[in-house]
């Protein structure tokens, strides 16, 4: 059963981490603050997805509530 879980988690981790890196690059390279803010939402949401895949739902939910919603709203508005 552990090998099946590992077979599912490894590709999911690489896909989610690629999304997080792409979002981080979007924050760095984007000149428009609104687009950079949306890239930040993508990055924070992908990091929350990594926490959920590590079976840490409280940390993942905190990541979404505090960072993806709260901090990004402050940046955009």
Image (cartoon, rainbow, N blue to C red):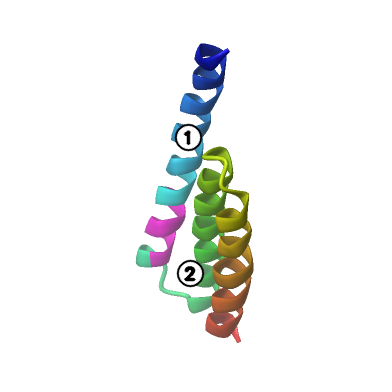
Q: Position of residue 22 (x, y in %)?
A: 43, 50
Q: Quadrant of the C terminus?
A: bottom right
Q: Earlier in the sequence, mark 1 or mark 2?
A: 1
Q: Which is more toward the observer, 18 or 36?
A: 18
Q: Quadrant of the N terminus?
A: top right
SS label for mark 1:
helix
| Identity of the residue drawn at 41% across and 73% down | 31
Please identify, in this view, whether the residue under mark 1 or under mark 2 is nearer the observer: 1
| Identity of the residue drawn at 56% across and 20% down | 5
Q: Which is more toward the observer, 58 or 53?
A: 58
SS label for mark 2:
helix
Image position of 17 with respect to 42: above or below: above
User: Magenta segment, which residues?
Assistant: 22-27
Image position of 55 with respect to 63: above or below: above
Mark 1 highlights which residue?
A: 13
| Identity of the residue drawn at 63% across and 71% down | 69
Q: Which mark is residue 58?
A: none
| Identity of the residue drawn at 49% across and 45% down | 19
For residue 62, what is the image quadrant? bottom right
Secondary structure that dominates the magenta span: helix
Please tell me how many numbered marks the rendered image carries.
2
Q: Is residue 48 left or right of residue 28?
A: right
Image position of 19 with respect to 14: above or below: below
Q: Which mark is residue 36?
A: 2
Looking at this view, name the residue that lies furthest to the bottom.
77
Q: CA distance from mark 1 to mark 2?
A: 24 Å
How many residues crowd mark 1 within 10 Å: few (<14), some (14–19), many (20+)? some
Does the magenta segment cover residue 25? yes
Q: Position of residue 24 (x, y in %)?
A: 40, 58
Q: Is residue 36 left or right of residue 64?
A: left
Q: Position of residue 23 (x, y in %)?
A: 46, 55
């Amino acid at each position: 059963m552990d090998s099946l879980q590992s077979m599912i988690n490894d590709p999911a981790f690489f896909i989610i981490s690629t999304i997080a890196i792409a979002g981080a690059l979007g924050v760095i390279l984007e000149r428009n603050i609104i687009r950079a803010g949306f890239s930040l939402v993508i990055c924070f949401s992908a990091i929350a997805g990594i926490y959920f895949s590590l079976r840490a739902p409280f940390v993942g939910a905190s990541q979404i509530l505090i960072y993806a919603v709260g901090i990004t709203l402050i940046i955009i508005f």
